[in-house]
Image: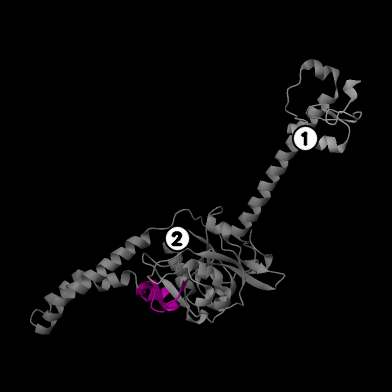
Amino acid sequence: MADKICIICLEKETKYTCPACGAKTCSLDCVNRHKLRSECTGKVDPAKFVPKKEITQNPSLINRDYNYLLNFERKIDLGIKDVKSNAKMMFRRQMGNNNKRQKFDGENFENRITRMKKKYNEPQYSFKRENVLVIHLPPGMSRATQNKSGYDKKAGTYAWTVEWVPVGSKGTPLSGFISYRLKEELTLKEALSLSQLAKSLEVEPENISPNSLRFGLENVLAYGKRSIISLNSDDTLCKALANKAVLEFPKIYVMSEPEIWEEYTQSEKEAYGPESDSGEDNASSTDPTSSSDSDSTSDSDSESSDDSESAPEEVSTKNEHNVSQESQGNQTEPGIANTAPETYDDEEEGFSA
């Protein structure tokens, strides 16, 4: 009779048996109290050892083991299918679709492609809104994972992921932040979060004047030295990024004072100009052999001799600049595989994963 009494309340007759530990209880209240008191899960452990005698005496144990193995196999199959489907989606985002019409035009198109292929090792790239050259990183890298730019079908507009990097009064980049799903119709002043900017600058949001801010897009095609492209704060994201180049998504520096980073600021033509403007042509024009030949043919001219005396300073400066550019230009970015570019029409497929 004692075996039929609830082990919790010790008053009523038992109705339930715990599958995990075999404790007998009378009601749901006593079941919950039993789980709390003994920290019991209330579920059978399928990996628990069972003697052979019990298995032969109780056929339900064989069914339990069979169901456990069946469910385990099903979970493995589902996991493999999920990995394959995710890989296909990532591969489709990175590789693009070669069957669709591709659009290649815009200002400085060839110059941007030439500079990109010189700096990056066989990069994969695509063209987005207003011929924005987007250089893609290998799948799994943090910046590629953070990129949520794409066409928002509900809003009927393209939305950008933008990284904002405030620059302090001493010209030091501060901790930045990323904004997601910014509509391309927003101006730079509207897209920027003043509360996040104030937090990075350690000032109150009321002390920041949006009209006094200056914006600069990181030049991802620059060699060696830092370079930013000046942007108009009243331009929309669509207009500001038109015919530019970004690494996965735009990285925009925010300066609170006009004189900050003036030495790094360039126009679009200066940033994406032909390679001959800053490449090997300057090296050939400042070749020491050519200067020595000119000196040998003008020994009798006093004015030319004066010019040749001042020439070495300019030559050495330019040559050092060219050598640094050539050595930095030959150092390509590793780990970027070559694939066919993504198409302009892919924007209608929605946000990337």
| Quadrant in the rendering for residue 9 | top right
Residue 272 among magenta residues: yes
Vertical placement of 278 versus 334: above or below? below
| Count of numbered circles on the image | 2
Check disc 1 and give the amino acid type: Lys
Vertical placement of 327 versus 109: above or below? above
Q: Tell me the residue that label 1 is attached to.
A: 35
Say which residue appears at 61% left-offset and 61% top-offset: 96
In-image side of 351 versus 241 (left or right): right
Image disc number at residue 249: none
Residue farthest toward the left in the current orientation of the protein: 300
Check disc 2 and give the amino acid type: Tyr
Camera-nearest residue between 310 and 289 = 310
Magenta region:
254-277
Residue 273 visible to an observer of this rendering: no
Which circle, 2 or 1, is nearer the viewer? 1
> Which one is earlier in the sequence, the residue at label 2 or at label 1?
1
Residue 210 among magenta residues: no
Residue farthest toward the top in the current orientation of the protein: 53
Q: Position of residue 136 (x, y in %)?
A: 53, 61
Camera-nearest residue between 31 and 310 = 31
Colour scheme employed for the rendering of this structure: one colour
Q: CA distance from mark 2 to mark 1?
A: 60 Å
Q: Tell me the residue that label 2 is attached to.
A: 120
In-image side of 196 versus 117 (left or right): right
| Picture quarter with the C terminus | bottom right
Q: Position of residue 12 (x, y in %)?
A: 91, 30
Vertical placement of 286 versus 27: above or below? below
Mark 1: give few (<14), some (14-19) or many (20+) Cα within 10 Å: some
| Picture quarter with the N terminus | top right
Residue 352 visible to an observer of this rendering: yes
